[in-house]
């Protein structure tokens, strides 16, 4: 069964460093999302992406964040200068579109900022 | 602010019994509702979607939706220890045509053998 994949599973970085989290959505899906979950808190929407542009972004998704679909398969989230409070699980999700509303999540990347 | 509310639990249910999980949402315009299961340290796994008022059954799971009351529930019949997890209620909220999932805080369910 097709699934969303994410790499790396765990990323440790120093405060102020740039990180890139990678996702490969399900191949025939058109809509892509990033969510994050701080330990013990709820899953929060960060950004949605369709047709090679951002559809919507949350207040969390400030100028330090960017997303890109550099080729036909990868979808990346970049954090330019990480802060301690960026430590969280980051989930990529994709949706087929065309009347299909279900979003399927990848396994996540645990980001630890020291 | 469009909210989704769940009782955080923990909810303890004996093995073989029915587990009942509840959720309310604030956006009256929402049309799509989902239940995700999340094991500790793992990602949300979609288990049910429901779009119309009434009940929708899939195996041991039944989702119930009442749009007038802005209420969604999930029933798990014949509960198994493997059902022990956090159950997340999620609602599609729309902002100028753009859709995103808004999640509740989740209900932690423990099935007691």
Image: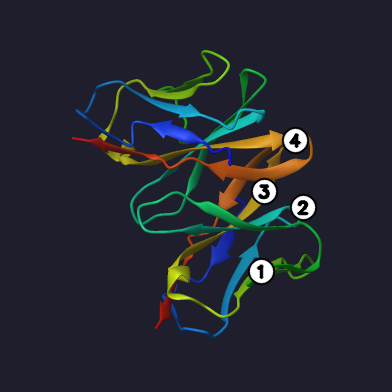
Mark on residue B59?
A: 1
User: In what element is the residue under mark 3?
Assistant: strand
**What is the x, y in percent for residue A13?**
22, 29
Are tags 2 and 1 found on a single chain? Answer: yes
Are tags 3 and 1 found on a single chain? Answer: yes
Which chain is indicated by disc 1? B
Mark on residue B29?
A: 2
User: In what element is the residue under mark 1?
Assistant: loop
**x 21%, y 28%: residue:** A15
Q: Earlier in the sequence, mark 4 or mark 1?
A: 1
Residue bearing mark 4: B97
**x 49%, y 45%: residue:** A44
**Marks 3 and 1, how far apart in space?**
24 Å
Q: Earlier in the sequence, mark 2 or mark 1?
A: 2
Are tags 4 and 1 found on a single chain? Answer: yes
Which chain is indicated by disc 4? B
Front-lying residue, B81 or B11? B81
User: In what element is the residue under mark 2?
Assistant: loop
The color scheme shown is rainbow
Residue bearing mark 3: B92
Which chain is indicated by disc 3? B
**Marks 2 and 3, how far apart in space?**
9 Å
Above or below — where is A51 with respect to B20? above
Front tag of 4 and 1: 1
Front tag of 2 and 3: 3
**Do the numbered discs 2 and 1 sit on residues whose CB atoms are within 8 Å?**
no
Q: Earlier in the sequence, mark 3 or mark 1?
A: 1
**What is the x, y in percent for residue B22?**
60, 72
**What is the x, y in percent for residue B59?**
66, 69
């Amino acid at each position: 069964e097709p699934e969303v994949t994410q790499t790396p599973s765990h990323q440790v970085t120093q405060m102020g460093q740039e990180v890139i989290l990678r996702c490969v959505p399900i191949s025939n899906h058109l809509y892509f999302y990033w969510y994050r979950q701080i330990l013990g808190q709820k899953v929060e929407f960060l950004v949605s992406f369709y047709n090679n542009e951002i559809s919507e972004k949350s207040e969390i998704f400030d100028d330090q964040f960017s997303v890109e679909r550099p080729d036909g398969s990868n979808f990346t989230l970049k954090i330019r200068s990480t802060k301690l409070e960026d430590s969280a699980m980051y989930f990529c999700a994709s949706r087929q579109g065309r009347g299909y509303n279900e979003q399927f999540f990848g396994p996540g990347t645990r980001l630890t900022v020291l | 602010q469009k909210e989704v509310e769940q009782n955080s639990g923990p909810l303890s249910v004996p093995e073989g019994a029915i587990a009942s999980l509840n959720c309310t949402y604030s956006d009256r315009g929402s049309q799509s509702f989902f239940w995700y299961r999340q094991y500790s340290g793992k990602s949300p796994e979609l288990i049910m979607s429901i779009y119309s008022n009434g009940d929708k059954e899939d195996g041991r799971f039944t989702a119930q939706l009442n749009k007038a009351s802005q209420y969604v529930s999930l029933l798990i019949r014949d509960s198994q220890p493997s059902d022990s997890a956090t159950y997340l209620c999620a609602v599609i909220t729309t902002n100028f045509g753009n859709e995103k999932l808004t999640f509740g805080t989740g209900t932690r369910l423990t099935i007691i053998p």
